[in-house]
Amino acid sequence: MGVLSIEELAETLPAGHPLAGIDLGTKTIGLAISDLGLSLASPRPMIARKKFTQDAKTLLDQLAREKAAAVVVGLPVNMDGSEGPRAQSTRAFVRNLSAMSDLPFVFWDERLSTVAAERVLIEMDVSRAKRAGRIDSAAAAFILQGALDRLQALRTASSRE
């Protein structure tokens, strides 16, 4: 299906299926899945990155097991809103992945998501060693939660019309 805006996703999203959120790191892929009511994001075990074809297969298999209806992808834009090499790499990953799947993808500004996720893990008193293994999935949950909150706002606005 390719890349949609969050507004387009809100109009086409089938009921009864969760959304997935991913945070593409250089060494891992953080993954989070929503509940069926699209209100809460929960982190899943991260995926260790190897080569694109292996990464894509592992990720798509996990998305199929979770019955995800769409994927929210954290887009690492710079603080000034510009896109650098990491954002270009993320766009290329999604372009290649979307050629292998019918799932719709939505880019979501992930500025400060890793910082916020790390703060939450620190507040939960998670050790530094364990944080390293959970940070990308926690960031994916933070990214997905932002998109879920936006979808809820769009549903509320359309019900008022």
Image: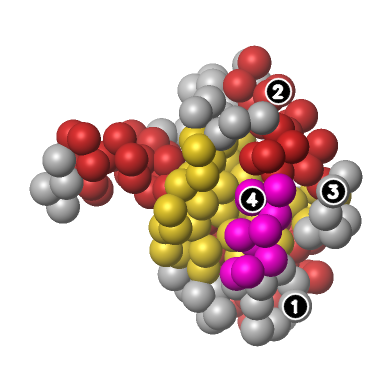
Q: Quadrant of the C terminus?
A: bottom right
Residue pointed to by mark 1: 14
Instruction: Say which quarter of the image contains residue 84.
Output: top right
Q: Which residues are magenta?
A: 57-66
Callout in the foreground (2, 3): 3
Residue under the point 54% across and 21% down: 78
Local secondary structure at mark 4: helix
Local secondary structure at mark 3: loop
> Is label 1 in contact with label 2 (beta carbons under 8 Å)?
no
Q: Quadrant of the N terminus?
A: bottom right
Crowd tier of the residue under label 3, counting other residues whose Cα lies within 10 Å: few below 14, some 14–19, many 20 or above = few
Crowd tier of the residue under label 4, counting other residues whose Cα lies within 10 Å: few below 14, some 14–19, many 20 or above = some
Residue under the point 65% across and 84% down: 16
The image shows residue 27 at horizontal and vertical percentages of 49, 28
Q: Nearer the viewer, residue 52 or 86?
A: 52
Q: Amino acid at mark 2?
A: Gln
Residue pointed to by mark 3: 100
Residue pointed to by mark 2: 88
Disc 1 and disc 3: Cα gap in Å?
Answer: 20 Å
Residue pointed to by mark 4: 59
* Picture colour scheme: secondary structure
Q: Nearer the viewer, residue 57 or 123?
A: 57
Task: Tell me if I can see residue 79 in this picture.
Answer: yes
The image shows residue 94 at horizontal and vertical percentages of 74, 39
Residue under the point 42% across and 63% down: 42
Crowd tier of the residue under label 1, counting other residues whose Cα lies within 10 Å: few below 14, some 14–19, many 20 or above = few
